[in-house]
Amino acid sequence: MAAPVVAERTEAGVARGDASAPASRVMHGRATPYLFLLPYLAIFTVFGLLPVALGVWISLHQWDFQLPNTPFVGVDNYKELFSSDSLVFSDWWQSIRATAIFTVASVPLLVVLPLGIALMLHRRFPGRTFFRAVFFAPYVLGVAVIGLLWRFLLDANLGFVNFVLGAVGLPQHTAWVTSTPWAWVSLVGVTVWWTSGFNAVIYLAGLQDIPAELYEAATMDGATAWDKFRHVTLPGLRPVLLFVITTTILASANMFGQSYLITQGAPGTETRTVVAYIVALGIGQNDAGRAAAMSITLTIMLIIVSLANFRLFRYRED
Amino acid sequence: MTSNHGDMSRRHLLGLGLGVGAAATLGLAGCGGGSDSKGSTASGNGGKDYTGPKVDLKLWNGFTGGDGDIFKKLVDQFNSEHNNIAVTVATYQWDDYYAKLPGAVSSGNGPDIAVMHMDMLATFAARKVIQPLDDVAGALGLTENDFAPTVWKGGIYQDKRYGIPLDMHPVGFYYNKTLMQKAGLDPSKPPQSRADLEAALAALKKAGIQGFWISPFQFTGGMTGYSLVYQFGGSLYNDDATKATFNEDPAVEAVSWLTKLVADGHSPKNVGQDADYLALKSGKNAFNVNGIWQINDLKKSAGLEWGVAPVPQIGQKKAVWANSHNFTIVQQRRADANKVGGSKVFINWLSQHSLDWAAGGQVPARKSVREDSKFAALTDVNTLAAELPDAAFPPALPGIGDVTTLFYTAFNEAVLGKKTPKQALDDGVAKANKLLEDNRKKYGS
């Protein structure tokens, strides 16, 4: 899966190092690149591959870290996820549903809004640095801080949000954290407020990489502001956009802290996300086998989504 | 890390040269070292004294409220009285604490002493996170007569004792006196019966006050629901906790009584976590069933006129949710007899000082301490101690906490109006019975 980002960098590298490349290839043995890769490979193996392999192994057992017996159950933990009479079936699919709702609702906003912010902050105006800091500021707060903060701000009966809404004559009894769909509005809203700054910074870096000459040329050709955005900015941002969309989908699909702290899964377990359920099962109930099976199933689902995402972008490129 | 290393070499020395006999003459209590001691009852004198080399003990608890400070003061006092034992305290949120403990223990970074709720003891004993301490109970001369029977029996798993009860903490009925006055009620007479409470709520409603906010969350709306289930003659489980029974008529009746408060406008809809209690403090809510641990917090609230009484009897009998904190000794990967000996001395000492702990807003577990005249002087705590004969403690069974969570989820759905009480509780019980069966397979009980 060579992302366009990588592809472009390689091209640039080849172009720059053209003259010296053949000479160095002669100087060194075939093992050289692998030797350079070795330190990372070692770290990746210990902290990446082995835990994944162990996770797969655990998912084939009824596994409690503390119990002496961890009976092998084959693929039972996976089968359970798809058989409607099992203990975990309804909770699992409900949590998948919660994650899907959150992802579908939050990703478009988290992709589009930060782009708008970045375009604004890319212009020159007095106080630009200040505003850049302001938009990025929420992101530096930990999830525990923003979670507690918003839980109290959004409280249906004592919260500041409903107080302000009431003061300006709007409905003041909205249950922001204990009823759907309002809980989703809250979770998506808080997440957008919290993480938009991060995506905006990525976009900003991308915008600064687009050569000014392209805009000049477009101006000479009589392009309008929209034309420039459509035909210069967006194509120039494509690799950045792919990165932002992919990481935002993954981040949203892994949402945990916000619902854990703000809604606590309420009403009932309706806003409990997959990751929150996996944590509750694996760490809360010490049912690591089932939790591992769910993690791996979730991973496979996310790989499929990411692949589709890459496919889509490559298709557009052609 | 360095101290771990030190322990190891000391253990090796013992094993190599001195032998177990020498260890015994040194007066070391507890297991002889090595993993073979797992599950065996510790020898020694059960914590009467400790004369070995200086040990550093780590203690974990979840006392994040005002009780935490009082606990630390007690530990400081203990440390100053014992120059060969130094206890350091780490405090976590209970939820995080229980999640963190097994991992810490299996990686060798766990505490030596852990404070635990009685309904968690069996789970952690079955998972070999904590070790038996029958000898401490023996040395302390503790017998069932000195405790509430459920609490005493709750510390036993497979015929061995794993917990020394420190306190008991029921929920109580807190009331805002200013609001009661506003509604023309006598603040010196908090409602104690169903008729009184319903009359008081009607009076409050007339004065424009929503008098009894019902939180849909475990803390503490769910605990109110738990209490009422037992008041209406029901229970969460059958006698041996093999079947969940919280969808039977009494439970449905109890939960329906609470959801009706919301429907009748005595409680706002969608009460948030802690909002019921905060509203009591800010003069919006007249009544709140909450834990005994809030007494100290309310004492600090200047200008608030409040009182606490036993939970009113709504159903056919009196009953309240209650739980108990217990001391446990953590099972180490590398057992250290000195540390176990020191830990037992600490538990012994604190149990004898549990009257001071009562100032933390908890009822001492020992009857003899409760009968002390100094305890009678703690008026508010004492008011709630009167509830203890009617306390409905959770059953002691491995994995039971996870099952009880399903009752709280059902309660949440019912109070938020997502499902009827009957439907929510039926769904909860169906899941609970599956989980109970799963637990039986897992823990082999």
Image (cartoon, rainbow, N blue to C red):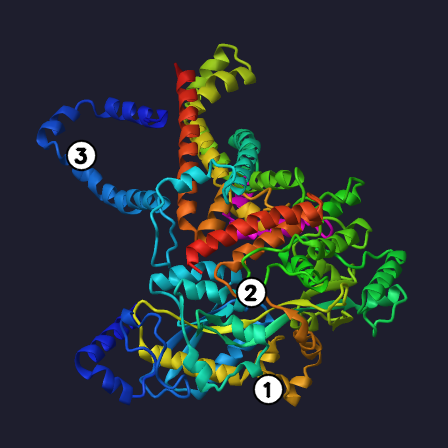
Tally of numbered tags: 3
Q: What residue is disc 1 on?
A: B368
Residue at point 44%, 25% (across, down)? A237
The chain to which mark 1 is attached is B
The quarter holding residue A164 reads top right
Q: What residue is disc 3 on?
A: A33
| A233 and B22: which is toward the camera | B22
| A43 and A267: which is toward the camera | A267
Q: CA distance from mark 3 to mark 1?
A: 76 Å
Q: Tell me, yes or no, if residue A20 can be seen here.
A: no
Residue at point 60%, 74% (across, down)? B168
Mark 2, mark 1: which one is toward the viewer?
A: 2
User: Is-magenta flag for residue A194?
Assistant: no
Range covered by the magenta-colored residues: A132-159
The quarter holding residue B203 reads bottom right
Quarter that holds the C terminus of chain A? top left
- In this view, B29 is above or below A16: below
Mark 2 vs 1: CB contact within 8 A: no
- In this view, B302 is above or below B245: below
Name the disc covering residue B305, or none. none
The residue type indicated by label 2 comes to Pro
10 Å neighbourhood of mark 1: few (<14), some, or many (≥20)? few
Residue found at the far top of this picture: A221
Mark 3 vs 1: CB contact within 8 A: no
Q: Main secondary structure of the magenta part?
A: helix
Mark 2: secondary structure? loop
The chain to which mark 2 is attached is B
10 Å neighbourhood of mark 3: few (<14), some, or many (≥20)? few
The quarter holding residue B288 reads bottom right
Disc 2 with disc 3 on a shared chain? no
| B61 and B325: which is toward the camera | B325
Q: What residue is disc 2 on?
A: B395
